[in-house]
Image: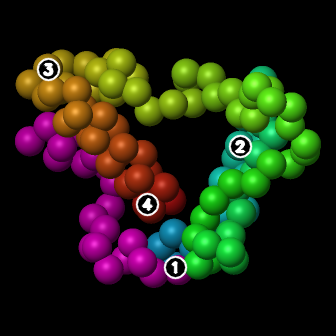
Amino acid sequence: RVLDSAIEDHPTVEPADLKSPTALGTLAERVDLFNTWAQSRQWPALHVKATILQSHGSRAGTVATKPLAQGEPYIEVPEFDCLTVDRARREFGTLADSLDDFQALLLLLVKHVMAVVGS
């Protein structure tokens, strides 16, 4: 019941739709979308970008965008851009009271995936 009330405004997505280029776009489109989003966030450090790695079976991965010194941060993501247990509990309030940490975080992830798929 918690899941129903948390994502009731989002359309139903069948598992087959998740593989369709029309639901989430092609891998190249998703990589470009992620890079655009990450750049727009203006994080303190972002010296990597997502790319399709031909050398690794055309999987998504990251590459450095500049030479990095040993110990230099290549990415700094502020907590407000992270999916955390605390964020899940804040967003769902009392709906998350009966959930353990894993379940609360999973529910938050599902909510965000459904928002992307539904848009």
Q: Residues within 10 Å of mark 3 (few under 14, many from 20)?
A: few
The residue located at (38%, 54%) in the rendering is 114
Q: Residues within 10 Å of mark 4 (few under 14, many from 20)?
A: some
Report, in whole angstroms, how far the alpha carbon at label 4 lies from the one at label 3: 27 Å
Q: Where residue 92 is drawn, which disc sits there?
A: none
Report, in whole angstroms, how far the alpha carbon at label 2 lies from the one at label 4: 21 Å
Q: Where residue 118 is drawn, which disc sits there?
A: 4
Earlier sequence position, callout 3 versus callout 1: 1
For discs 3 and 2, the disc positioned in front in the rendered view: 2
User: What amino acid does circle 4 point to?
Assistant: Gly
Q: Where residue 22 is drawn, which disc sits there?
A: 1
The residue located at (33%, 24%) in the rendering is 85
Circle 3 sits on which residue?
97
Q: Is residue 10 magenta?
A: yes
Name the secondary structure under disc 3: loop
For discs 4 and 3, the disc positioned in front in the rendered view: 3
Q: Which residues are magenta?
A: 1-21
User: What amino acid does circle 1 point to?
Assistant: Thr
Q: Which x, y percent locates residue 83?
A: 44, 33
Report, in whole angstroms, how far the alpha carbon at label 3 lies from the one at label 2: 32 Å
Q: Which x, y percent locates residue 74?
A: 75, 35
Q: Which x, y percent locates residue 42?
A: 78, 31
Image side of residue 8 versus residue 2, left or right? right
